[in-house]
Image: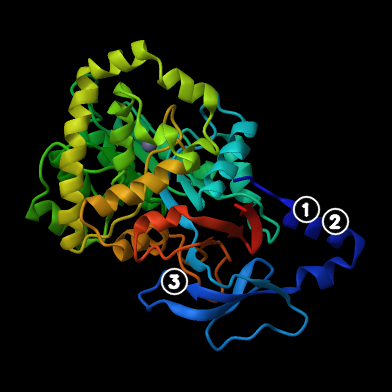
Amino acid sequence: MVIRRTAALALAIFAVAAAPSSQSTRDIAFTGVRLIDGTDRPPIDSATIVVRDGRITAVGRNVSAPAGARVVSLAGKTVIPGLVNAHGHVGDTQGLEANHYSAENVARDLRLYAAYGVTTVVSLGGDQAASFRARDAQNTPSLDRSRIFLAGPVLAPKSPDDARKLVAEDQALKVDIVKIRVDDNLGTTPKMPPDVYRAVIDEAHKRGLRVAVHLFYLADAKAVLDAGADFIAHSIRDTAVDDEVIAALKKRNVCVCPTLMREVSTFVYESTPSFFSDPFFLAHADRQVVDALRDPARQTAMRESRSAQRYKAALDVAEKNLKKLSDSGVTIAMGTDTGPPARFQGYFEQMELELMAKSGLSPRQVLAAATRDAARCMKLDRDLGTLEPGKWADFVALDADPLVDILNTRKIDSVWIGGNQVVKSR
Ligand SMILES: [Zn+2]
């Protein structure tokens, strides 16, 4: 698979050569589509999607291409909304090291997500100026990479006063959501005290901001929900979810983001994972990183790591909890916590879908969590998450139907963002 930007480039060149106004209003009609629009409607065969200035203007079976439209046949393809990762990280990793944030890495990561059909990522922390610039520049019909929304710095205040000051700074930065951690990293670090996270959440709400919380324990989930937390950024993984937490989540429709692949990444390199021989993975994986993760000494260290083995057990708890939460009507937002070293952006989102299905969710439920619901949970659903008039034309054309087998989301024919082709697999 290669990332091609020829279409966008050609459009850009044409726009310079011809009158920009006529170019910018030109329609594109995608025809012959089997459409899974991301709503609860059943798939529509032989549908047409009409796009103007990056957004869908009409979609459905009884839609015809407007006169003068550029017609793109997607006959035989199944089209789904672009995947939305509600918990990633962008721009910070170089090789196997973190803390190498740069504008180049931001651009690299957003192209990488796009290559795997993840057309939107919410970066939940560690975001610096280049990521804010990328977000602020993406409301354009010529976009050629995934969209980013962000939390800015992960807040780690030391007192309630400090908490209110940092939230004010977050607001000045224009973050999309506030991010905090309420965790002791398996008992190794101090946990943010309740009076501090209560101040964060209270101050955020006063300023019209929402708060995403990293957590691990059921008791903390209940406590932060009681304090008004708006988004649970990881699975509860110490023990089984109970009726009390389910009721608390449903009362305010707080979404849970399972990030099952985060757990996987903590132990999977204790040996050479099978996906290291998957061409779909190798198409974009950093070979130096892959080679480093094959190193026997590194694998032994992970095998003997107590935390790795505890997180392995936590994955099992998380999967059972995902099924129970979903069955109970809690809204699930697909997310992975990709971006840190050895958490491969794009490919891990594809694996996350597989793990969600293995946890007992139907392909339709998995797809909803990864499109409409993730967008809704992050308050992006006015523009994203489904293929309906008025929304950005961010979609993935597949060679097979993911409602039959969720693994079919890997059979990518092409990826389109704002109606621009950003990936061509043939
Ligand atoms: Zn994270």
- 56 or 49, which is in the foreground? 49
* Tags 2 and 3 touching, CB below 8 Å: no
- 160 or 249, which is in the foreground? 249
* Image quarter of residue 167: top left
Distance of mark 1 from mark 3, alpha carbons? 29 Å
* Image quarter of residue 102: top right
Within 10 Å of disc 3 (Cα), the crowding (few <14, some 14-19, many 20+) is many
Mark 2 secondary-structure assignment: helix
Instruction: List x then y, in percent, for residue 32.
Output: 57, 77
Instruction: List x then y, in percent, for residue 89.
Output: 46, 37
Mark 1 secondary-structure assignment: helix
Q: Measured along the vertical axis of the image, is residue 304 above or below residue 208? A: above
The residue at which mark 3 appears reads as 36
Which amino acid type corresponds to the residue marked 1 in the rendered image?
A: Leu
- Which circle marks residue 9 in the picture? 1
Q: How is the image coloured?
A: rainbow
Mark 2 or mark 3, which has the lower sequence index? Answer: 2
Residue 190 in view of the camera: no
Mark 3 secondary-structure assignment: loop
Residue 380 in view of the camera: yes
Q: Nearer the viewer, mark 2 or mark 3?
A: 3
Which amino acid type corresponds to the residue marked 2 in the rendered image?
A: Ile
Instruction: List x then y, in percent, for residue 250.
Output: 20, 61
Which residue appears at 57% of the width and 50% of the height?
Answer: 146
Residue that extends furthest to the left in the rendered view of this protein: 243
Q: Is residue 357 left or right of residue 139?
A: left
